Image: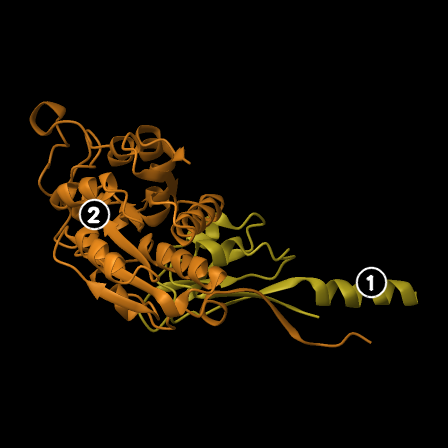
Amino acid sequence: MIQKKDTALKNAEASVKSLRAVEHHYCAGCGHGIIHRLICEAIDEYGIRDRVIAVAPVGCAVIAYEYWNFDVTEAAHGRTPAVATGIKRVRPNNIVFTYQGDGDLAAIGTAEIIHAANRGENITVIFVNNGVYGMTGGQMAPTTLAGQKTSTTMEGRSLRRDGYPLKILEMLAVLPGVKYVERVAVNSSHEVLRAKRAISKAFKMQIDGKGFSIVEVLSMCPTYWGMTPIQASDRIKNDVAIFYPLGVIKSC
Amino acid sequence: MGGWVAITILRNNFMAKIKINKNKCKGCYLCVVNCPNNLIKIEKELNIKGIKSACFSEGKCTGCAMCAVICPDGAIEVYRDI
């Protein structure tokens, strides 16, 4: 006789303890929901839920504390690595990570991220790059691609007027304090599985006390790209991942 | 004959199944394009948010869980009756 019992292969709500079973406020097809879950899966994998402290950014993910079932604090816009530095120095046994968007990390907080990386602080940074300021209405960010239409560049970003898109990871990889740098995407299931490995590795570097680790996640923003979620995930593969190549940039 | 019945029972029970929380679905349809066997379709009726949610159409699901991996809202559950 075959005994009947339910064997769950994958169930985000029941299997991930660090993720609260509430509905997100994110738009349909937004990558934030996937990245929240990947972080929670990595934390559950190492069993560090009771000693994790997250620092949430200003941006679309500003109320991430509603969705994460561990300690989260808030920081002023762009000052997230500075707050994380303070927490890590006062409580070195806690695992501290920051979750930042591209407007937060690459525009307003450029000074903080560069100096936190240069000091080699033992923190983990999850950098979500979707190429626009999502929370405030889809304005141009430093990471917006050339020719991309946003609400402040109605005819596309002009390289002559606005300069080139900023490659933060390549800038940070030359600093000796930075130990682990990888760029991943969340546009398809295979890329999500790669992103999960990268985020787990970044947390592992901090648990082992190696130093500063940063993972950039290329994410979709269908609302402000003016596309359907499926077109937006194709755009990551065809345009965004060409300019920002995926893979490990530095690991030591 | 007995062997054939046993194989049929085993196959029906070993095939994985998907349960989609239709009221949590926001209708991005990333699961529809990421299913390797094209087993997920779009519902004809609207859910509580007024969106046509994704739904599982009958077929041989291998339980790869690619739909649950990509779902931004964690609305998909993949399981197996054994």
* Quarter of the figure that contains the C terminus of chain A: top left
Decide if residue A246 is on the left or right side of residue A159: right
Say which mark, if any, is on residue B7. 1
- Depth check: give the residue in front, B53 or A215: A215
Give the residue type at disc 2. Answer: Tyr
Mark 2 surroundings within 10 Å by alpha-carbon count, few (fewer than 14), some (14 through 19), many (20 or more): some
Chain identity for the colour orange used in the image = A
Q: Nearer the viewer, residue A109 or B35?
A: A109
Q: Residue at x 29, y 35 (%)?
A: A169
Q: Position of residue B6 (x, y in %)?
A: 84, 67
x, y (%) of residue A130? 26, 44
**Residue A132 quadrant:** top left
Q: How busy is the neighbourhood of tag 1: few (under 14 within 10 Å), some, or many (20 plus)?
A: few
- Determine the residue located farthest toward the right in the rendered image: B1
Q: Mark 2 falls on what kind of element?
A: helix
Identify the residue at horizontal 33%, vertical 52% (top origin).
A31
Q: Nearer the viewer, residue B80 or A209?
A: A209
Q: Is residue A63 visible?
A: no
Q: Give the x, y percent position of residue A207.
A: 41, 54
Disc 1, SS? helix
Label 2, label 1: how far apart the Cα atoms are? 51 Å
Residue identified by numbered label 2: A224
Residue A102 in the image, given as x and y percentages of width and height: 21, 45
Left or right: B49 as drawn, with respect to A16: left
Q: Which chain is yellow?
A: B
